[in-house]
Image: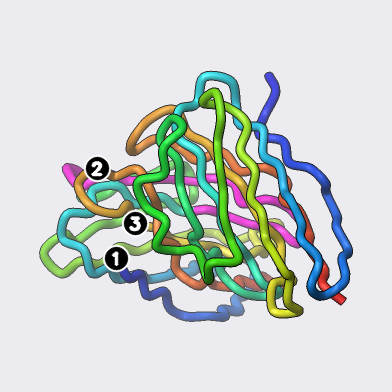
């Protein structure tokens, strides 16, 4: 089955710095890769996603890159702010049907001012 | 509009008792997912429904866990003879189709004493 590895598990940056979180997946049939942000005590919320026919997608300070050959994708947050502090989860769709998602174990991002 | 709702929000039960968790997905969403999140951990996929059928039950931890969905809407996750290791937040999510955003419910925090 699909396996998603996420690194690092924790990440501490200074306000204004960039943060990068990386994920690898095992199922070459995966074609949808969302990123979720979960603030303490709250439910996960989608922040950005990318599909297999695109190599990069950007939304303001957030960008995601995908390398299908290497089966890895990354989240880039620029000009980090304290409110970016949260747990971030990557996910990959399971198989060609692409309905279920397998999540990485999460990265706890701390942005200090 | 109304999002995904779950009930109860908190459940404390004694070891060995059965519990039933409920998920009301967004109206019209055909796919529904159950995840488990232990304290400080990632999202563990349990089961998903496409309509009323469950194509993939591989994530269920043991035969004490079962789930059903009727009428293509409400789903219940049942845990029989609960154990302390079942303590976690159980999250439900729904989406309208493959490769689309999963909307998460607020979760049910289960504590087995």
Where residue A48 sits, quadrant-wise, is top left
- Sequence order check, earlier mark of 2 and 3: 3
Numbered disc 3: what chain?
A
Residue B7, located in which quarter of the rendered image? top right
Chain letter for the residue marked with disc 1 in the picture = A
Residue B113 numbered mark, or none: none
Which residue is at 83% across, 49% downward?
Answer: B9
- Disc with the residue nearer the chain's start (2 vs 1): 1
Q: Which mark is residue A97?
A: 2
The residue to which callout 1 is attached is A2
Q: Position of residue B13 (x, y in %)?
A: 87, 65
Residue A43 is inside the magenta segment = yes
Counting residues from the start of the chain, the first of labels 1 and 3 encountered is: 1
Span colored in magenta = A36-54
- Marks 1/3 in contact by CB < 8 Å: the verdict is yes
Determine the chain carrying the residue at label 2.
Answer: A
Q: Which residue is mark 3?
A: A92
> Which residue is painted at 29% across and 56% down in the image?
A65
Find numbered disc 3 in the image and state the secondary structure of the residue it sits on. Answer: strand
The answer to whether dots 2 and 1 both sit on one chain is yes
Task: Choose between A24 and B65: the one closer to the eye.
Answer: B65
Residue A16 sits above or below residue B26 on the image:
below
Q: Residues within 10 Å of mark 3 (few under 14, many from 20)?
A: many
Residue A39 position (above or below residue A4):
above
């Amino acid at each position: 089955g699909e396996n998603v590895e996420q690194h690092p598990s924790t990440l501490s940056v200074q306000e204004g710095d960039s943060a990068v979180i990386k994920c690898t997946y095992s199922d070459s049939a995966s074609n949808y890769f969302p990123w979720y942000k979960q603030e303490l005590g709250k439910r996960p919320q989608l922040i950005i996603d990318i599909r297999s026919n695109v190599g990069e997608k950007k939304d303001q300070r957030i960008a995601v890159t995908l390398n299908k050959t290497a089966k890895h994708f990354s989240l880039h947050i620029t000009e980090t702010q304290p409110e970016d502090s949260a747990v971030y989860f990557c996910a990959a769709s399971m198989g060609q049907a692409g309905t279920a998602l397998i999540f990485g174990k999460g990265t706890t991002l701390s942005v200090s001012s | 509009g109304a999002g995904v709702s779950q009930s109860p929000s908190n459940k404390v039960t004694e070891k060995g008792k059965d519990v039933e968790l409920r998920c009301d997905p967004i109206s019209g969403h055909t796919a529904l997912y159950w995840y488990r999140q232990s304290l400080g951990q990632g999202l563990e996929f349990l089961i998903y429904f496409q309509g009323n059928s469950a194509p993939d039950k591989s994530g269920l931890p043991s035969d004490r866990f079962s789930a059903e969905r009727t009428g293509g809407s409400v789903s219940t996750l049942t845990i029989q003879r609960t154990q302390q290791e079942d303590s976690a937040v159980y999250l439900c999510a729904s989406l309208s189709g493959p490769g689309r955003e999963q909307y998460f419910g607020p979760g049910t925090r289960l504590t087995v004493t």
